[in-house]
């Protein structure tokens, strides 16, 4: 069995990941961390039966990871926390699944450096759903044929989401830009804003929308819209738990969901 810990264990994603680990044939929960609800039972925080594993203070990350012989830690928190915690985790020789979005290029460089220096294994993905990773492949193909069309990305998420645009929208922009040899990004438009050859990126926030992403290729007299809609967080949770079991059997390095899914 693989010992898996969760940080952000009391959050929307973290609680579902704790629950899913308890039904996994490959993983068992070794530890749970959060800023809130320290000392409470991680199972109760996930609205399941008590697990006898309390939520630990993130200040005790190193000590608890070592004491519990954790193999892999799953992190769905906020960028400012991940950039601090991931180097501590890698320094303990523990593998990482990072789902936190909104990481700046500088934060990502710190995290990548810690993973590589410590010779651990990690999957880092802005989106752990199978469908979104297939969506990335489809938009890459479409972009090759439609590079002269106007390209816009529209994403929608619930009103509690902190970062904008979503990590998935930014990844979609990068996929398209790589496919067509480079494009500027414009985030929303206001005032006098004539369209150039950019990729426009737009973030909608409201209610309990789990996550919608549309890529629009608009030409004269026609348009194509490629859309992914997440119906529940389960798809991200299942993907992250699958990645945690997969990564432990790999060589040291940084992997994407394409690698996990063999796409
Ligand atoms: N990659 C994906 O597939 C995917 C899918 C959904 C959400 N996300 C991302 O996952 C992250 C979490 O989303 P959420 O909806 O669960 O948010 P949330 O606000 O419900 O949960 C975040 C949790 O992290 C905890 N936290 C914050 N700082 C911490 C720290 N320093 N140490 C320990 N815990 C800390 C919070 O207390 C909270 O319990 C976001 O970045 C979101 O965009 C990624």
Image: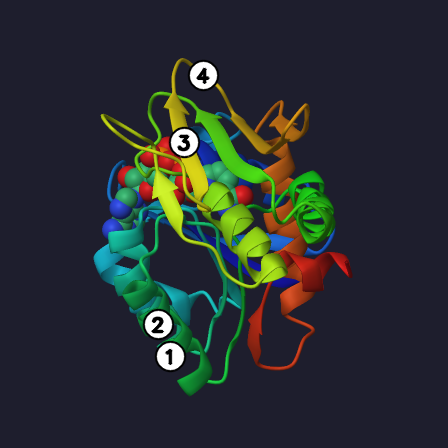
Q: Residue at x 46, y 47 (%)?
A: 170
Residue that sits furthest to the front in the current view: 220
Residue that sits furthest to the right in the current view: 262
For residue 118, side relative to residue 163 (left or right): right
Disc tally is 4
The kind of secondary structure element at disc 3 is: strand
Q: Does mark 4 have its CB less than 8 Å from ligand 1?
A: no
| Nearer to us: label 4 or label 2 | 2
| Residue assigned mark 2 | 109
Q: Does mark 3 have its CB less than 8 Å from ligand 1?
A: no
The residues bearing labels 4 and 3 have C-alpha atoms spaced at a distance of 18 Å
| Depth order, front residue of 33/184 | 184
Residue 194, picture quadrant: top left
Q: Residues within 10 Å of mark 3 (few under 14, many from 20)?
A: many
| Nearer to us: label 2 or label 3 | 3
Q: Residues within 10 Å of mark 2 (few under 14, many from 20)?
A: few
């Amino acid at each position: 069995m693989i010992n898996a810990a969760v940080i952000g264990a009391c959050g929307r994603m973290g609680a579902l990941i704790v629950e899913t680990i308890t039904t996994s044939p490959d993983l068992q929960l070794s530890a749970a961390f959060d800023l809130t609800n320290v000392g409470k039972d991680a199972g109760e925080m996930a609205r399941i039966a008590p697990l006898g594993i309390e939520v630990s203070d993130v200040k005790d990350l190193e000590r608890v990871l070592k004491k519990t012989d954790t193999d892999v830690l799953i992190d769905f928190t906020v960028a400012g926390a991940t950039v601090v915690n991931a180097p501590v985790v890698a320094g303990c020789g523990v593998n990482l699944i990072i789902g936190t979005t909104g990481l700046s290029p500088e934060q990502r460089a710190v995290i990548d450096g810690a993973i590589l220096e410590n010779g651990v294994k990690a999957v880092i993905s802005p989106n752990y759903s199978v469908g979104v990773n297939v969506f990335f492949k489809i938009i890459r193909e479409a972009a090759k044929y439609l590079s002269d069309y106007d390209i816009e990305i529209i994403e929608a998420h619930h009103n509690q989401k902190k970062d904008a645009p979503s990590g998935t929208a930014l990844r979609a922009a990068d996929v398209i830009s790589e496919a067509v040899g480079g494009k500027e990004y414009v985030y929303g438009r206001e005032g006098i804003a004539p369209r150039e050859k950019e990729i426009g990126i737009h973030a909608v926030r409201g209610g309990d929308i789990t996550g919608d992403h549309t890529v629009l290729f608009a030409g004269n007299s026609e348009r194509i819209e490629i859309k992914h809609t997440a119906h529940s967080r389960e798809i991200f949770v299942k993907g992250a738990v699958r990645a945690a079991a997969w990564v432990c059997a790999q060589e040291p390095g940084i992997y994407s969901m394409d690698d996990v899914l063999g796409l």
